[in-house]
Amino acid sequence: MRADARRNLGKIVEAAAEVVAERGVNAPMEAIAKRAGVGVGTLYRRFPDRDALIAAVGDHYIHTMAEALDTACGSTADAWGAIWDFISWAAEPGRTALSTALAVLPDEVIVDRTEFARVRERWVGQFDELVRRAQAEGSMRPDVGVEDLIHLLNVFTCHPDSLPAPVAADPRRYLRLMLDGMKSGAATVTESSR
């Protein structure tokens, strides 16, 4: 692929991610082309239909998540700080808008696709290693697993409309409170944990 064609492809996918975050998965293809600074014909040459474009947006999204986790791991010495940096990044409003828009789609459109599944598996593995490192460092409760953090992220980033209004208005505060409950020494013995 020529360099200019690769640049156009990247511009289209990034523009599509922005427009989908703002207007949902049924955003007009013309609006996406305009945001990307390309003609509609160029957009359709790259993506023959909306499903192909949305699949590319999903791949872009999971690659972005994996890159953000890499950045968090590389920029913070302790695992707990890296976990917070990543979760805080993922819960930023612009990102949650895209996550929310993509979450309404059936799994086969994005989640079940080979590229998405491959990158997600690597991302989950790296996130799991980070959780285990935080536990080995003594900063995270031993009964917390990576799936707990993924479920927490899912609620805050993919389904913010199901949160109470004060929580949705200040998600970072409530994520911090919930994560603080996952720190070592925060465990409460309950009947179900005995």
Image (cartoon, grey):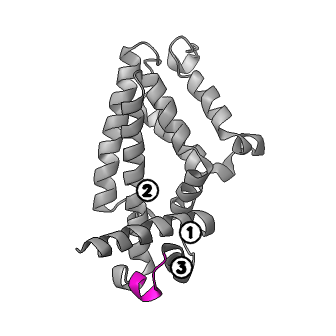
- In the orientation shown, which residue stands out farthest toward the right? 166
Magenta-span inclusion, residue 39? yes
Give the distance between the C-alpha atoms of the residues marked 3 and 1, in whole angstroms: 10 Å
Give the distance between the C-alpha atoms of the residues marked 1 and 2, in whole angstroms: 13 Å
Q: Quadrant of residue 115?
A: bottom left
Instruction: Give the amino acid type for the residue marked by disc 2 in the picture.
Output: Tyr
Q: Which residues are magenta?
A: 37-43
Report which residue position mark 2 lands on. 61
Secondary structure under tag 1 reads helix
Report which residue position mark 3 lands on. 34
User: At x 46% / y 16%, what residue is drawn?
Assistant: 139
User: At x 59% / y 57%, what residue is drawn?
Assistant: 97
Q: Nearer the viewer, residue 24 or 114?
A: 24
Q: Nearer the viewer, residue 52 or 17?
A: 17
- In the orientation shown, which residue stands out farthest toward the left? 1
Q: Is residue 3 above or below residue 64?
A: below
Q: Nearer the viewer, residue 70 or 34?
A: 34
Residue 193 seen in the figure: yes
Magenta-span inclusion, residue 179? no
Instruction: Give the amino acid type for the residue marked by disc 3 in the picture.
Output: Lys
Tally of numbered discs: 3
Instruction: Give the amino acid type for the residue marked by disc 1 in the picture.
Output: Val
Where does the image place residue 70, in percent across and percent down from the top left? 36, 39
User: At x 37% / y 46%, what residue is drawn?
Assistant: 66
Q: Is residue 145 left or right of residue 90?
A: left
Residue 109 seen in the figure: no
Q: Is residue 187 above or below residue 12?
A: above
Residue neighbourhood size for the residue with mark 1, other residues' Cα within 10 Å, grouped as few (<14), some (14–19), many (≥20)? many
Which numbered circle lies on residue 19? 1
Q: Is residue 21 left or right of residue 139?
A: right
